[in-house]
């Protein structure tokens, strides 16, 4: 319960969130130094405690999202639970929840009531579709918002079945936008002494990350489709097959393309009228791929990468998760941190990508709480008998 | 130049960023009310001004990232440019850049120098690989970090060629983490009166969004591969073919699976011993898909969606960009905003997904600045003759 290091040190977050979008947000807040108290449903707790994979009988999935948090189980429909919850809110700076809209209202903890009782409290709600609009009462999961928000329509191979982004970016981006909102509201509170309500939806967040697909549609009137592993308007900027696998290159301008042709010992490509500008290379992307892969086939990925790196052509291997976790740069950046757990042993999880000069970046994170595991310490802190 | 509404209203951000990760971050800060002054290279400006698609001779790509910002062109290698830049930093709250590490040092604007001269200034650097570590001097592009960070290894169809996530989430997530860092540092500054340096890398950000792929590797020792459009451990949670296209469903628990079998009028699936629990459904995912698609083939996507919605089974269409932009929920949430531009006409771009009770959410955003277009107004504000 000691204040941890970080810009949000000393702040208390009451965390009603479950599964992914909300817990991801409060993990970011915890990594920034806030004290995060999970308020969980008695007996069952956060649904993610029951989602695999399991290690030593414990959800590794839950663990990867809830390190360094505290837990108290409260029944918000019972008087005793509500009394403790009220005492928590009275001490808290931020409340985060990711229930379906309406649940908090039914419990009497809608924004208007909360703001009246605790005017400095910041209240952030992450939901599938948001607190307003025709779909507000529908349940959403990552799969649904990835599909509806458009990103699946531009991800995958042309003509192949639909492809989901392989991590739950519907949840994660909503968690990130919510974390931005909370931090901005914390700053604003120092100017006004007042909290505010933050309403972030997973579907909205998907539209917000569609990027150039929106303006490509605006420019052409045609919705863009999936194009595999290449960039729609920069060429060569794609994955290519080598003698033993694949590599990616990102030769984003004429000078990098010239360097690439040197590394490949294919000087004639530089003067080939199909490839003299980025626009022409993009128009003739398939022809260029054939030419490049004919040469890439002659050496291994590792050999090509060392030649390309030496020449300063942006490139990289397509790492699997094991290779990424062992990447020297990610290790040097402390992006793989450990958690010691009595049941799971030492678990490696992703670190905090926000590196701050004013604070350290611990390579070990505190364990996940047992359900209700911090009850007595929290009650003592509240002064509740 | 009037202060806009938002929690960061009154704050000034000096924006040296180019292309995507940095501009995305400062767009978020601008949407939160900060005044963002782009400091661009004379004549050429932000590289994104020259990246297509173009509408009316202007980059729609640049426009979608730089609405509501101001522009001044400064040569930071010349005395006059540096003098104005220093005056800007003296007035600013935040400096954001996304140069390759070392560029700012060469210009004399490394963190130590900046912090000594302007101790309250917050300085955020978004880069490909970060300010430290063995790859710090390498150039990275979205394609490279998507490949190296592991997300491409879990995105795509099994056995098919590598698949990139169809928007530049390498850049965008780095922009989001940088925006979180800036906001947290702004809060912290109110407690300490001191700025800090924020170092975010695109590669780190990719590891931070890998989510359950990391713990699946930890639990099994085997790096997970791509699995198309389904969830690795929740079933049925995938895209399915219908009579006229596809839909997605996310039946994340037994009760939703029961509802699904009712909608499909396939009660026998509920008692099929292969499908009685989520774990069994995941083990027998291909058999279940065959059963479900046999039935889904009998009606159109629209027909199934209305039946599934009525039954409360989370589901959705796979929208293309046009369909997403016209989705009633996204429209109701003001997630498609307009920008009026003298050359491009009215351009629709993504809105701000952070909805705040204390502030409005304008449905029209200010236009992008011409290169150096705000020079005189900025100089007047600085009081420079």
Image (cartoon, coloured by chain):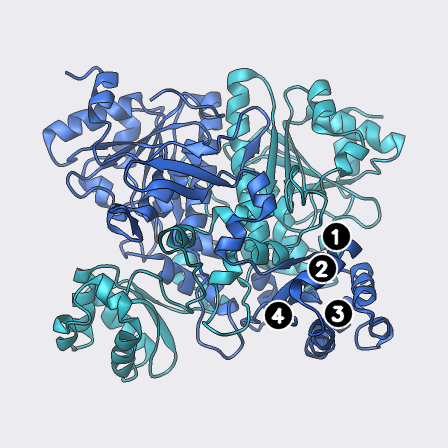
Chain colours: A blue, B cyan
Query: Is residue A88 placed above or below A76 in the rendered structure?
Result: above
> In screen coordinates, is B167 left or right of B138?
left
**Chain letter for the residue marked with disc 2 in the picture:** B
Q: CA distance from mark 1 to mark 3?
A: 15 Å
**Where does label 3 land, which residue?**
A279
Residue B68 at x, y percent in the picture: 63, 44
Q: Residues within 10 Å of mark 4 (few under 14, many from 20)?
A: few
> In screen coordinates, is A296 left or right of A347?
right
- Callouts 3 and 2 close, C-beta under 8 Å: no
Query: Is residue B293 placed above or below B148 in the rendered structure?
Result: below
Q: Secondary structure at mark 3?
A: helix
Q: Tell me which residue sits at (16%, 35%) in the image.
A: A76
**Where does label 1 land, which residue?**
B47
Q: CA distance from mark 3 to mark 2?
A: 10 Å
Q: CA distance from mark 2 to mark 4?
A: 34 Å
Residue B204 at x, y percent in the picture: 55, 45
- Callouts 3 and 4 close, C-beta under 8 Å: no
**Where does label 2 land, which residue?**
B51
Q: Nearer the viewer, residue B54 or B96?
A: B96
Q: Secondary structure at mark 2?
A: loop
Q: Nearer the viewer, residue B332 or B173?
A: B173
Q: Secondary structure at mark 4?
A: loop
**Chain letter for the residue marked with disc 1 in the picture:** B
**Where does label 4 land, which residue?**
A244
Q: CA distance from mark 1 to mark 2?
A: 7 Å
- Whether residue B336 appears in this view of the structure is no
**Chain letter for the residue marked with disc 4 in the picture:** A
Looking at the rendered image, the quarter that the C terminus of chain B falls into is: top right
- Callouts 1 and 2 close, C-beta under 8 Å: yes
């Amino acid at each position: 319960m000691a204040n941890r290091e970080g810009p949000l040190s000393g702040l208390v977050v009451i965390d009603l969130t479950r599964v992914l979008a909300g817990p991801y947000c409060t993990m970011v807040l915890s990594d920034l130094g806030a004290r995060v108290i999970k308020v969980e449903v008695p007996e069952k707790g956060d649904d993610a405690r029951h989602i695999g994979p399991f290690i030593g009988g414990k959800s590794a999935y839950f663990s990867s999202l809830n390190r360094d948090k505290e837990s108290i189980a409260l029944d918000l429909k019972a008087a005793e639970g509500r009394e403790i919850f009220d005492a928590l809110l009275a001490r808290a700076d931020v409340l985060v929840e990711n229930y379906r809209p309406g649940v908090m209202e039914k419990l009497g903890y809608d924004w208007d009531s909360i703001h009246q009782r605790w005017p400095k409290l910041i209240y952030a709600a992450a939901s599938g579709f948001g607190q307003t609009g025709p779909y507000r009462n529908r349940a959403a999961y990552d799969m649904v918002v990835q599909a509806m928000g458009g990103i699946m329509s531009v991800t995958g191979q042309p003509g192949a079945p639909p492809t989901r982004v392989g991590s739950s970016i519907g949840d994660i981006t909503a968690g990130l936008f919510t974390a931005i909102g909370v931090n901005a509201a914390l700053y604003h509170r120092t100017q006004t002494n007042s909290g505010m309500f933050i309403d972030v939806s997973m579907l909205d967040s998907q539209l917000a990350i569609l990027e150039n697909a929106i303006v490509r549609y605006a420019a052409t009137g045609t919705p863009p489709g999936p194009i595999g592993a290449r960039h729609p308007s920069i060429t060569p900027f794609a994955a290519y097959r080598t003698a033993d696998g694949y590599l990616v290159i990102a030769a984003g301008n004429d000078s990098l393309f010239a360097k690439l042709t040197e590394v490949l010992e294919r000087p004639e490509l530089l003067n080939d009228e199909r490839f003299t500008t980025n626009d022409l290379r993009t128009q003739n992307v398939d022809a260029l791929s054939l030419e490049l892969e004919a040469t890439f086939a002659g050496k291994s990925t590792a050999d090509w990468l060392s030649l390309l790196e030496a020449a300063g052509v942006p490139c990289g291997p397509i790492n699997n998760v094991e290779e990424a976790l062992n990447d020297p740069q990610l290790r040097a950046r402390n992006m793989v941190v450990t958690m010691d757990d009595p049941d799971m042993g030492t678990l490696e999880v992703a670190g905090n990508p926000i590196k701050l000069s004013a604070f350290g970046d611990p390579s070990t994170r505190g364990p996940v709480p047992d359900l209700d595991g911090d009850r007595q310490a929290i009650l003592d802190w509240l002064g509740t008998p």
